[in-house]
Image: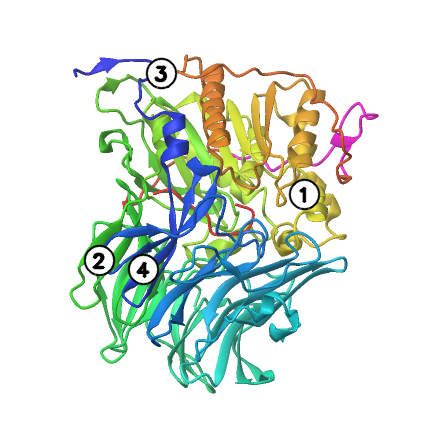
Amino acid sequence: MSEFSETYGSWPSPISAGDVARGVRRPAFPTVAGNEIWWEESRPDEGGRTTLLRRNTDGTVTELLPPPWSVGTRVHEYGGRAHLPVPRRDDKAITRMGVVFANSTDQRLYLIERHFEDPVPLTPEPDRPNALRYADPALSTDGKHLLCVQEHHTDDGVHRSLVSVPLSGRGAQDPRSIRELASGAHFYASPTPSPDGQHLAYVRWNHPRMPWDGTELRVGTLTENGLTDEYTLKGGVDESVISPTWADDTTLYLASDWPGFWNLYQAGLTGQAIALHPAEEEFHTPPGHLGHRSFQVLDSGRILTLHGHTDMAPSVYDPHTLDLTPVSTELTTWSHLHSDGKTVVAVASAPDTLPCVVHLDPTTHRVEILHHPTKTPPETAYLPVPLARTFPGRHGAPVHATVYPPTHPDAHTDGPAPYVVWAHGGPVSHSTREADPVKAYFTSRGIGIIDVNYGGSTGHGRTYRKRLHKEWGIVDVEDCVAAARALVDEGTADPERLAIRGPSAGGYTALLALTQGIFACGVSHFGVTDLLGFSEGTHDYESRFLDTLVGPLPGFAERHRERSPVERAADIDVPVLLLQGLDDTVVTPDQAHAMATALARHGVSHALLEFEGEGHGFTGEKARTRSLEAELSFYGEVFGFTPDTEPIELTTDPPAPRAQPMAEIDTAANDPEKDELPEVEPLPEITPEPEVSTTAGEPGTQEATGDFT
């Protein structure tokens, strides 16, 4: 096919929204045990459920959970690891592996025996739906119990603890047989028994800190009556310690950001922890989801570890020689590492490879792809090649970003292209450079993307993360604007066709950025619009998150108002698209509804699309398809091209009042008696930077690592 010229945005693309929604199956938490490998796999084409798969010793793959079963835990609302293979014995006393999993529908733990078809419950039915939740499981040393985080929702609030659940199933009928091991803190993670079963290491932290702010690594003695003689081995209010892993009965490895980055440490049961390989890079992914591990101890005594910045790759560390030897692989973005001491498995991807389950031989360094969940990935020719860039932000501070140019094997258009700034969720999160069909959906049609890891993002150390402390709504906005202006100044982006979009926290950033006079439109996917309402209405895990990002209440109530997009609607004069799930418990639906009401009051063109049955992040095929097509249609309406999708209807009318009253939000946008919003102090004027510096890097996509992503 010869090259042809088309208008940016209307390039013909074989990547449809339906293909993207149906085809992206994502593996998570591969686990190796007994020469077999288990993992969780999301199925957007099956109503958004997550199933369990097992790779057998002969290489065949078996699905263990038919519909409507679905794996998933809602501990912290974001969950994390929700399954664990466990040993079982048949009549011949031969050990065979079963698997325990948390069921997303009722949040109970179930056991799948090797030759039993129906899962057997291990935990009791709570007195209210989803009131008892479990996550981050580990096997007790004797193989008879599951140690995990339990979250109990009551009228008095949320109680979390570490518990021991018998694998016999007795706990389903007798809740007293589920022993509480540790309690008293607000949050727990990583219960890890020592090889001899004498000690238990775990991580805990308290409000208002998040796990990347400050945690404690605790160790106690395991007895028949529970955990005794507990003490803090490492960590505190200004040090994030994560992923304790036993090297032997008295030695632990862990990751700590005490030096400014999450580096590897070794610690005994007493005494000072020792840094293993100090470096200004991360040796662990951010602790947003429970159960993530970025290093594993091998039987040889060496450590297989991931390290890097936003994209992490594997190396082998030898504690005897102190050598860190990289593994040569074309897969550039690794996560979810697991090993039984001999075999290493992970989830890995690259700019041209969707996430897949891989095996890594720690001796030969050979990497083998074991399972590609997505059977029909987009053609490589339509995948954009990511370009790592660093732009100057406020006071010369670096702004890390990845540019995805419009990409098509045959289409060509002269002149600067329309570009959309992507602000990731989090905000303490980051985007990676793995292949992403959602990005390719836009770039293959002629719309460029610049994915900004703004100040506050993870992957670049504690100092970069702390740029957002008390500055959320300022630094993130400035960095996104700086990146967009840099592309305009160099002639890459069309200044008249700039947009910004983001999910959740990124939606908040996008909406505030629309007040700066640089963007022609913006898209908020379930974005935060009212900070006071968010603090009152969100779930317990993030109920104090804004203490760090904005300031503690009630003292900083006025700052919360000033930085709420719903209070800044009068400063927006460009079209806005709001996408919202009606079952969202993180950013509740009243947030988008209030924003639409405020925009209508000020005559701003907008569209509010709400999706029944969808929570924080769309999982169903219908919602994913419709939201993608609506976003493309929205850009076509604003940028002046005709997309291959149904037109979107913009309005200046307010949305219909809700049938059921939502939680009251302390903002004038929800007061129909008020004709205008109160005057608030505007965001600081953002002036363009004169020059742009760039740094070369490897070509990613968004890593959802926790918080309100």
Q: Which mark is residue 65?
A: none
Tell me where the magenta segment starts and ends, as one range.
Answer: 666-686
User: Mark 3 — residue?
Assistant: 10
Horizontally, residue 301 falls left or right of residue 260, namely: left
Identified by mark 4, the residue type is: Ile
Label 1 and label 2: CA atoms lie apart by 53 Å
Q: Secondary structure at mark 3?
A: loop
Instruction: Please state the horizontal and vertical placement of residue 704, each as a whole percent of the image.
Output: 46, 48
User: What residue sits right under mark 2 in the picture?
Assistant: 58
Marks 3 and 4, how far apart at CA = 44 Å
Q: Considering only order in the chain, which callout, 4 or 2, is on the residue closer to the N terminus?
A: 4
Q: Is residue 685 magenta?
A: yes
Give the number of the mark in front: 3 or 1. 3
Camera-nearest label, 1 or 4? 4
User: Which is closer to the viewer, label 1 or label 2?
Assistant: 2
Q: Nearer the viewer, mark 3 or mark 4?
A: 4
- Asked whether residue 273 is in view, the answer is yes
Front-most of residues 132 and 653: 132
Is residue 234 rendered to the left or right of residue 353? Answer: right
The residue wearing badge 1 is: 531
**Residue pointed to by mark 4:** 37
Q: Residue 559: image x %, image y %?
A: 70, 45
Res 204 → quadrant:
bottom right
Amino acid type at circle 2 is Asp
Left or right of residue 116, residue 183 in this image: right
Taking the spot 72% from the left edge, 47% from the top edge, the residue there is 536
